Image (spheres, grey):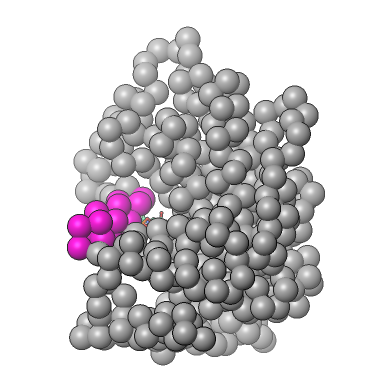
Amino acid sequence: MPMTTMADLCLVGIDELTEKVKAIFRKSGLTDANAAALTRALIAGERDGCKSHGIYRIEGALRTIKAGKVRPDAVPRVLPSDGSAIVRVDADGGFSNAAFELGVPALVELAERYGLASLVINDCCHFSALWPEIEALTENNLAGLAMCPSYATVAPTGGNRPLLGTNPFAFGWPRPGNDPYVFDFATSVAARGEIELRRQAGEPLPEGWAIDVDGRPTTDPAAALSGAMLPFGGHKGSAISTMIELLAGVMIGDLTSPEVLDFLGTTTLAPFHGELILAFSPKIFAAGRPGDPFARAETLFDAILGQGARLPSQRRFAARAAALTEGIRISGEEMRQLDRLLAH
Ligand code: NDP
Ligand code: PYC
C-alpha cells in the first residue's frame, strides 16, 4: 500500500476498521478466534501510529496463508505444567496472537506467585509488534521482556551477508495510574517494515541502515532489501540480536532466523518460529528492601523527563489518545485496498 499526501487521508472509526480487517481474515479462511486476535494486533498498530506493523501487514499475512505456511484453523493449547514457572503454548502452526492471548493468564498467575515466570510459544507465525504483549503484563502490575527471532536479513557487525533477524526486543514497567514505560524495537537499525514502507513511498533510507548485495553501504531501500540490514549500535546490537537467537530460538527448541529463511525460502512471507516472554513482579523482587519499587521508578522517570527527554511509547500513547477520540487516519488508497481485499 503506497504512502500518500495529506489530501488523500481519511478518518475511520476503530470499530469500523476492525470489522473490515477481521472480515478480510475470515474470508481468507482464518477461524473467528484467530482472525479476531490477529486483527486486534494490527489495529492496535494502526491506532498507535506504528504503520510498520499495522494494516500494511495484511497482504503479507494473506500471502502466508495462501502459501500454506501458517494454519488458518490452528487451535493453540497450553501444554500440561511441568511444575516449573514456564508456561508453554503450542501455537499449532497458527499466527502467534491467539497463542499469546491463551497463555497470558497463566503467565500472570505464575509471576504473581513466584515473582518471575516465562511464557514460551512454539510453532507460530509471528509478525506483530511486541508492545501489545508487554502491555498485557504491565496492566497486571508486572514488568516484562519479550523477544523473538525473525528471518535472516541482518548482517552481524563485521559481516557482510544476512544471517540474524531483525529480532524485536521489548520491555515494559508498570506505572500505576499512568501509561506504562514501554520500549519495543527491532535490533536492526530499523524494522524491515520501515524499509518496505520507504521503498513503496520512493524515499531513500538514512545512511547506516543497510548494505547492498556486494556489502557496500546503501540508502536505496530495494538494494537494502536484497542486500542486508545492519544491527543497531554496531557490535552491541549484533550481540543482543544473537542473544535473542539463542534464548528465543535455540533455548526454546524453535527455529533461529537462518533456519526460518531456509524453511520459508523467501522473505515475502511472514516468519515462522517461537517467542519468549518473561514476566517479573517488582513487588516480590523488592520485598524486604527499602522503598516502594513503583514510587522509586517514578523518581527515575521524572528525572529523565526533567532533562527534556521523552519516555519511549509517549509518542505512541499520544497517537492512541488521538485515535480513540477522532478515529484512525489512513490513506484513501489504503481504504480502497481494504475494500478490494474484501471484495476479492
Ligand atoms: P522505532 O525505532 O520506531 O522505536 C523504537 C522504540 O523507541 C519505541 O518504543 C519508541 O517509542 C522509542 N523511541 C523512539 N524515539 C524515541 C525518543 N526520541 N526518545 C525515547 N524513545 C524513543 O522501532 P523499530 O523500527 O525498531 O521497530 C518498530 C516495531 O517493529 C516494533 O514494535 C517491533 O516489535 C516491530 N518488529 C517486529 C518484528 C517481528 O518479527 N515481529 C521484527 C522487527 C520489528 P514511540 O513508539 O513512542 O516512538
Ligand atoms: O519489520 O523487521 C520487521 C519484521 C519482520 C517480521 C515482522 N516484522
For residue 257, what is the image quadrant? bottom right
Q: Furthest-top residue in view? A: 288
Residue 312 is at least partly visible in this image: yes
Residue 299 in picture, x, y percent from top left? 29, 29
Residue closest to the eye, 160 or 21: 21
Decide: is 302 above or below 146.
Answer: above
Looking at the image, residue 207 lies above or below residue 311: below
In the image, residue 289 sits, relative to residue 322, either above or below, namely: above
Residue shown at 40% from the left, 66% from the top: 19
- In the image, residue 319 lies at what x, y percent? 27, 59
- At a point 39% along the width and 23% down the height, the residue shown is 293
Q: Is residue 165 left or right of residue 189?
A: right
Q: Decide if residue 198 is in sight here.
A: no
Q: Quadrant for residue 78, please give it.
A: top right
Count of numbered marks: 0
Q: In the displayed structure, does residue 284 sit left or right of residue 293?
A: right
The location of residue 223, given as percent across then percent down, is 57, 87
Region rendered in magenta: 312-326
What secondary structure is the stretch in magenta mostly built from? helix
* Magenta-drawn stretch contains 291: no
Q: Closer to the camera, 318 or 323? A: 323
Identify the residue shown where x is 49% and y is 73%.
Answer: 24
Of residue 276 and residue 68, the one placed in the foreground of this image is 68
Quarter of the image where one finds residue 202: bottom left
- The quarter of the rendered structure image containing the N terminus is bottom left
Q: Is residue 5 above or below residue 310?
A: below
x then y, percent, for residue 249: 73, 53
The residue lying at 28 percent from left, 37 percent from top is 178
